[in-house]
Image: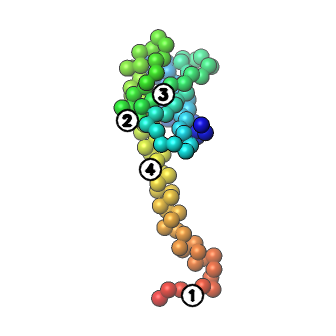
Amino acid sequence: METISYDLLGVVPTSTATGVKITRLEIPKYEATPIVMVWYTIWDDREERGARIDLHKQVFLDNFGDVDKSHLNAEARLVVNFMSSLATRQTLVAAMATAALPGMQRLANPWQPKNR
């Protein structure tokens, strides 16, 4: 399955209680799914691990070893908020491109008669 990856460093702060740092988000490129994968590290460990988030429930589905995942619900909500803002931006860009298209066609052909 092809995925799109987003860097989340600085978007989701490191949990001071657990040391979990969310580093990136992966979403399926061609499928709509309520489950996404995030990659994280714990404290200063360089090994990235993956965990799934349920977008509807806004909670982690996987365990984090010794870390109680109930402490990470705020981080899950931040990832969901990031995805919402991303979807809003993509919708806005698409709407702007569609709205600009007729004007851009007129500019591309200045000899085309103008509608009056």
Labels 3 and 4: the sequence-earlier one:
3
Residue type, mark 3 in image: Arg
Question: Which residue is at 48% across, 28% downward?
Answer: 52
- State the mark number for residue 84: none
Labels 1 and 4: the sequence-earlier one:
4
Mark 2 neighbour class, 10 Å CA radius: few under 14, some 14 to 19, many 20 or more: few
Front one among 28 and 14: 28
Question: Which residue is at 44% across, 50% downward?
Answer: 88
- State the mark number for residue 88: 4
Residue on which the image places disc 2: 56
Residue type, mark 4 in image: Thr
> Given this view, does label 3 or label 1 mark the residue nearer the observer?
3
Residue 113 at least partly seen: yes
Rounded to the nearest angstrom, the CA distance separating label 1 from label 4 is 36 Å
Quadrant of the rendered structure where residue 23 is? top right
Rounded to the nearest angstrom, the CA distance separating label 2 from label 4 is 17 Å
Residue on which the image places disc 3: 52
Contact, CB < 8 Å: mark 1 with mark 2? no
Kindly give the residue lying farthest to the top in the view shown. Answer: 66
Residue type, mark 1 in image: Pro
Residue on which the image places disc 1: 113
Quadrant of the rendered structure where residue 55 is? top left
Mark 4 neighbour class, 10 Å CA radius: few under 14, some 14 to 19, many 20 or more: few
Labels 2 and 4: the sequence-earlier one:
2
Residue type, mark 2 in image: His
Task: State whether residue 39 is above or below residue 7.
Answer: above
Quick one: SS at disc 3? strand
Q: Classify the position of the N terminus by image quarter.
A: top right
Front one among 81 and 37: 37
Quick one: SS at disc 1? loop
Q: x, y percentage for residue 26?
A: 55, 35
